[in-house]
């Protein structure tokens, strides 16, 4: 499966971050987790077909998480979609969608299959189920009812060793079927062929957990248990842990804690507060608690099987070259500077440590990346080694930078 972050902002979008949404591609089908404003545009830019959406999972009814849903449905209607779509979310989702459709005089050509989750949910609920995958919801701990999701591929049966089976006297289809189903087969001469002698171990399916907006909760750990990829919010840095708690959000330390307890293979942090212009600073904090971590880069695919999945989804726009070379703050500014090769207008930063350190970045970069590569190798996760180019970037950024909140007159209000 391929996970593509479409928007990694929290409540307020910035010039380079869009509102929350994550697309998951699997075998040609797309599953959308939250649908912030602009999610449908970001899908186009990511190179993911909107017509391939099977289901949309909404975490809660803060508008930044579902503001793009009606626009998306209207587009699907204009595309003359005729296959059903599943919409999953807290109770009230159906009323919201149907009111808006009626208000806009839209009579959908396609069926909407709703699955609404009651607010008294206190454990796992299976909210989507087909032959190959299922999705489970659990309640999180936010200022309003909010659920997290776990997307799970079902285990595939083990391989049958046909040669060995024949040698042992198995020759009928029913016998093969029985063995595959885990049953032992008694032959005419009375000897028994055990299923485990012929059939290999079931191959475990890949899994993905989507956990946002929440304080630390054991339910998040359950959702993320042994997942290949855990997408977890890290709205705040450690310095604002109090604010995280107050607003029902997680800090970088909370995200790392969930990842550690759940033993996920890869933690991806997102849902960044607008006050953090450089998410690599947050990444460094997360890695203090859980090393196989990475930041969600909008439109940059994350693979569970890089050898087979590379190239399936190719972004149609240039990706943010965050902090490339210049070590500057926001993505677009960093990119400009990289292209032009000269210093552009950087806002001066409190503390000033970044500016002074960036001068030597080109020489320190190569040595840093060498050592951090070794460190990474130790973990040996294939998922984790998906994009070496990017990994170089954090090594120098993490060394010197500290998180610099914006000044109070910047244009974010809630976070
Ligand atoms: Zn949010």
Image (cartoon, helix red, strand yellow):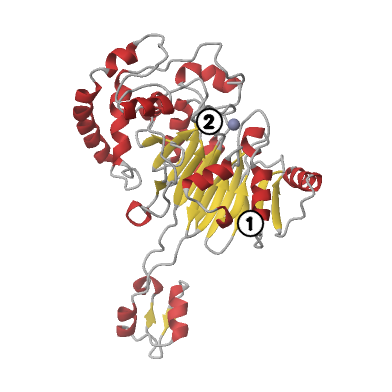
Mark 2 crowdedness (10 Å alpha carbons): few <14, some 14-19, many ≥20: many
Residue at 35% across / 18% down in the picture? 401
Residue positioned most to the front: 340
Residue drawn at the location 20% of the way across and 30% of the way down: 366
Q: Nearer the viewer, residue 6 or 293?
A: 6
Instruction: Residue under label 2, please give it.
Output: 9
Residue 282: x %, y % from top left = 42, 25
Q: Which quadrant contains ligand 1?
A: top right
Q: Which of the two marks, 2 or 1, is nearer to us in this view?
A: 1
Total residue callouts: 2
Q: Is residue 415 visible?
A: yes
- Which residue lies under the disc numbered 1? 79
Residue 159, quarter of picture: bottom left
Relative vertical location of residue 185 with respect to residue 50 in this rendering, above or below: below
Viewer-side residue, 390 vs 330: 330
Query: In the visual, does 160 lie left or right of 111?
Result: left
2 or 1: tag closer to the N-terminus? 2
Residue found 32% across the figure and 45% down from its top: 381
Q: Is residue 292 above or below residue 25?
A: above
Q: CA distance from mark 2 to mark 1?
A: 28 Å
Question: Few, some or many C-alpha atoms within 10 Å of disc 1 (few <14, some 14-19, many ≥20)?
Answer: few
Q: Residue furthest top?
A: 351
Q: Secondary structure at mark 2?
A: loop
Tell me, for residue 368, which label it has, or none: none
């Amino acid at each position: 499966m391929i996970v593509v972050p479409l928007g990694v902002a929290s409540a307020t979008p910035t010039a380079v971050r869009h509102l929350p949404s994550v697309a998951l591609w699997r075998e040609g089908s797309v599953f959308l987790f939250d649908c912030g404003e602009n999610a449908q545009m970001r899908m186009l830019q990511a190179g993911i077909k909107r017509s391939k959406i099977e289901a949309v999972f909404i975490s809660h009814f803060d508008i930044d998480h579902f503001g793009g849903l009606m626009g998306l449905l209207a587009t699907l209607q204009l595309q003359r979609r005729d296959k059903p779509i599943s919409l999953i979310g807290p109770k009230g989702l159906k009323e919201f969608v149907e009111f808006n459709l009626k208000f806009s005089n839209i009579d959908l050509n396609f069926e909407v299959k709703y699955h609404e989750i009651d607010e008294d949910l206190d454990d796992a609920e299976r909210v989507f189920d087909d032959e190959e995958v299922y999705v489970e919801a659990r309640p999180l701990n936010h200022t309003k009812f909010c659920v997290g999701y776990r997307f799970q591929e079902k285990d595939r049966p083990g391989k049958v060793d046909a040669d060995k089976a024949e040698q042992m006297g198995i020759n009928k289809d029913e016998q093969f079927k029985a063995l595959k189903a885990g049953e032992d087969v008694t032959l005419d001469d009375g000897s028994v062929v055990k299923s485990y002698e012929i059939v290999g171990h079931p191959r475990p399916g890949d899994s993905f957990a989507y956990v946002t907006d929440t304080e630390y909760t054991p339910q998040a750990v359950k959702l993320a248990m042994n997942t290949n990829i855990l997408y977890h919010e890290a709205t705040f840095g450690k310095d604002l842990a109090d604010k995280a708690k107050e607003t029902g959000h997680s800090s970088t330390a909370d995200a790392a804690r969930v990842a550690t307890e759940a033993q996920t293979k890869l933690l991806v942090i997102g849902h960044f507060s607008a006050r953090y212009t450089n998410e690599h600073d947050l990444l460094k904090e997360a890695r203090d608690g859980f090393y196989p971590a990475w930041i969600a880069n909008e439109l940059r695919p994350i693979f569970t099987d890089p050898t087979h999945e590379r190239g399936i989804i190719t972004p149609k726009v240039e990706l943010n070259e965050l902090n490339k070379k210049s070590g500057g703050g926001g993505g677009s500014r960093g990119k400009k500077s990289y292209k032009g090769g000269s210093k552009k207008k950087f806002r001066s930063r409190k503390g000033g440590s970044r500016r002074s350190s960036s001068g030597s970045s080109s020489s320190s970069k190569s040595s840093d990346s060498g050592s951090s590569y070794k460190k990474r190798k130790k973990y040996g996760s294939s998922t984790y080694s998906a994009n070496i180019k990017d990994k170089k970037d954090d090594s120098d950024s993490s060394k010197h930078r500290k998180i610099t909140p914006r000044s109070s007159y910047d244009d974010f209000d809630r976070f």
